[in-house]
Amino acid sequence: MITLDQLISLLAKARYVAVLTGSGISAESGIPTFRGADGLWKQYRAEDLATPEAFRRDPTLVWEWYRFRRDIIRKAEPNPGHDALAEMERLVPNFVLITQNVDGLHQRSGSKTVIELHGNIFIDRCVECGREVDRSGQPEPETALPRCECGGLFRPGVVWFGEALPAEALNRAWDAVDQCDIFFSIGTSALVYPAAGLPDMARQRGAKVVEINPEKTPISSRMDLSIRESAAHTLQEIVAKLKAVKAS
Ligand code: BJW
Ligand code: ZN
């Protein structure tokens, strides 16, 4: 176990910091988490919709869910938690932000080195030819089922249950886990693999591991420091203290 003050002095000396984020960091931007009380959409859970089987069975329903979420995300703004991580990147020599989120809010708040493990919700990808279209700056197509020029159906460019994560992203994440001195797990329930395995891998490689989450998770007891508070508040405090130590 370490204290918050010990964490700050370790951070001030750290050569390499890696961070894993989940939907909890965007909760304070008004984006529902997956497994929280507000995580339900109609009567469905993420596990019912975020699968290739669900898309094969009822692509219209799955697209309806993704359009609903794209709308929320388009209207959302990064919050002080995203901002604090962008600031932390500027304060440490090597910094990698690994995110399970598909909302692009880290990039919008100024983070530079972002690894998207589960893709991006604004990419449409053709199931036939693989062509990708970025819809982030565009209005949604009028049609319920968007199609590619080749005639194939578009699907959201995200990673569903049972699908492999993008190999390059996962390799970069493993590399960061190998090299980091400090690893943060922030706003994730640590239930969905392989992302949920990264904090333990970092710990086994000798990194100090820190969790920020108002709720206990399956990894909490193995952390060097488990902070049971919201990400925005805690990250602002950590970055303010880090700046003060660096300036002294
Ligand atoms: C706050 C807060 C605040 C709130 N501040 N915090 C058994 C063991 C190991 C693995 C498996 C297994 N059985 C099945 C698997 C595999 C499966 C898996 O892990 N299943 C588990 C559920 C058991 N994994 C997969 O299928 C993955 N692929 C894979 O393994 O491939 C193998 C393969 C190899 C080669 C070829 C083929 C296959 C893929 C997983 C994909 C996950 N996809 C989703 C959807 C993405 C698209 C979309 O957005 O629609 O990713 S599911 C969903 O869960 C989404 C998230 O990224 C992910 C994680 O959720 P997250 O972010 O942790 O959210 P929540 O809601 O769970 O938690 C929020 C947390 O925030 C809570 O703890 C709150 O307390 C906290 N919080 N407010 C800080 N203010
Ligand atoms: Zn196509």
Image (tube, rainbow, N blue to C red):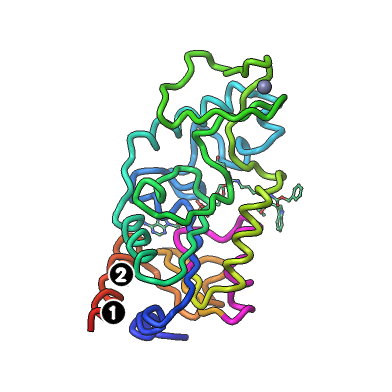
Residue type pointed to by label 2: Val
Furthest-front residue in this view: 93
Can you say which quadrant of the picture contains the C terminus? Answer: bottom left
Q: Badge 1 is on which residue? A: 246
- Where residue 3 sits in the image (x, y, percent)? 38, 84
Judge from the rendering whether residue 140 lies leftward or rightward of residue 148; answer left or right: left
Mark pair 1, 2: CA separation: 10 Å
Judge from the rendering whether residue 131 lies leftward or rightward of residue 185; answer left or right: right
Question: In which quadrant of this rendering is ligand 2 seen?
Answer: top right
Q: Badge 2 is on which residue? A: 239
- State how many labels appear: 2
Instruction: Please tell me whether mark 1 or mark 2 is closer to you in this view.
Output: 1
Residue at the image position 58 percent from the left and 51 percent from the top: 117
- Where residue 80 sits in the image (x, y, percent)? 29, 56
Residue type pointed to by label 1: Lys
The residue stretch that appears in magenta: 184-206
Q: Is residue 200 magenta?
A: yes
- Where residue 13 sits in the image (x, y, percent)? 40, 82
